[in-house]
Image: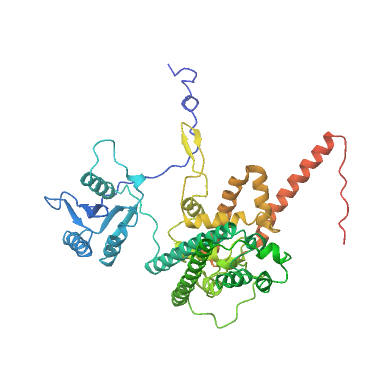
Amino acid sequence: MGPPGGDATNPTQAMPRARKTKVQTIQPVINPHAAGADIGAREIYVALPSALTSEPVRSFPTFTEDLRALVAWLQSFGIKSVAMEATSVYWIPLAELLEEAKIEVCLVNPRHVKNVPGRKTDVMDCQWLQYLHSVGLLRGAFRPAAEVRGVRALWRQRDALVHHSSWHIQHMHKAFDQMNLQIHHVLADITGQTGTAIVEAILQGERDPAVLARHRDKRVKATEATLLSGDYRSEHLFCLKQAFEGYQFLQNQIARLDAELGRRLNDLAPPAQAEPSPAPASKPKSAGKAAPGFAAHELLTRLHGVDLCAVPGINVLTAQTLWSELGGDLSAFPTAKHFASWLGVCPDNRISGGKVLGARTRPSTNRVARALRMAAQALHHAKNELGEHYRRMRAKLGGAAAITAVANKLARILYVMIKTRQAYRPDLHDGASELHRSRTLARLKAKAKDLGFQLIPTPAQA
């Protein structure tokens, strides 16, 4: 007797049709030469396979000589790979020493290796890491080459200095408000040529509005009394002086940092081609006052093998961030989808029982993703193919989701350009634009028909 609702004579009807889905192949991988390390600020616990020694767990202080002893201890047992959590910056010294000793470093996300509920100690954590790593259940984070990491550290330091510079500018604005000077309300940039000259004159003791007004640009329409009349109190002048000196100091630091970055990038970049490269189709987008103080556009084109600034929304700051965080080799990402997933600019689907529980993008602090989101937001009023795509996505999904969608598109475009070394081709987006135009026209015709009208095309004007 067959199952209820089925035909016993036809087994194919009794079996439900399997839903087509993506199957992930999991193969057991045993690594007998894997170790695990629990990283701390003052002490590091390391676990070895219990088959190698009777005392598989040892602790080491975090001083350099102790770390070298740790590496020698691992080498004595033939350890080839060490798994550790990305705990702040405490893991960096040990990871660099392990790489020098030709021991592979598997840097993992702490959320991915959380142990089962129970007692938590450093000894148990390092043993849990060692076990997961030995059976091949850990995936290491992406780490660029050593020379790229050096540039990355400098570029992140530069980003921090630029951020601190804005803090000093805000304190200058505060001092002006307290003295009731309206300079920062009239000038677009208080740190520009006009603003800097006026501030320097005020700090040198000049108070005459007529004299101070000589430093202003002719395009400033405000009167002298409105612009430069204020209540110059000594405490506010002192705060203004400190903020201005702090800003000038950071600008000198940024200039020195740019010189070092330019030197390193020039050493890493391949030699320039003997034949002059074709002129770009459009002028590279300006990055404003935050632009690096070296030939960043030329160096990045040589490093990437293609001009990334030809993509709408991408300027030298975005291209520099991309190279500093990833380098010019994206072989760690098999496809553009893997690259977008690593950036966190694609839906994070969570499905159970055939039902989509959620598809929101996962939280991420990826610097490349942040740069691509800023580039996507800059396309709001752009008169190009990506600008049209952004506006369509904004009308369909809303502002925040549109930025993520366009950042995803930019990521896939840049991935293909870097992998293939082919220049950006805006004509490849014509098909999508034409499809959108045809759909819009069909909707308009249907709406006109419902209202009793008929659309009549007019000949294009010459």
Q: Is residue 37 above or below residue 218?
A: above
Pinpoint residue 136: horizontal percent, then vertical percent: 30, 49
Q: Quadrant of the C terminus?
A: bottom right
Q: Is residue 23 above or below residue 428?
A: above
Q: Is residue 441 visible?
A: yes
Pinpoint residue 167: horizontal percent, then vertical percent: 50, 59
Pinpoint residue 71: horizontal percent, then vertical percent: 21, 62
- Describe residue 6's horizontal placement relative to residue 427 as left or right: left
Q: Is residue 7 above or below residue 174?
A: above
Q: Quadrant of residue 317?
A: bottom right
How many tags in the picture?
A: 0
Pinpoint residue 318: horizontal percent, then vertical percent: 54, 62
Residue farthest to the left? 54
**Nearest to the observer: residue 181 or residue 363:** 181
Query: Residue at left 22%, top 54%?
Result: 43
**Nearest to the observer: residue 101 or residue 167:** 167
Q: Is residue 424 above or below residue 441?
A: below
- Describe residue 446's horizontal placement relative to residue 49 as left or right: right
**Nearest to the observer: residue 96 or residue 277:** 96
**Nearest to the observer: residue 257 or residue 348:** 257
- Describe residue 23's horizontal placement relative to residue 405 as left or right: left
Query: Residue at left 49%, top 69%?
Result: 245
- Describe residue 190's horizontal placement relative to residue 51 as left or right: right
Q: Quadrant of residue 212?
A: bottom right
Q: Quadrant of the N terminus?
A: top left
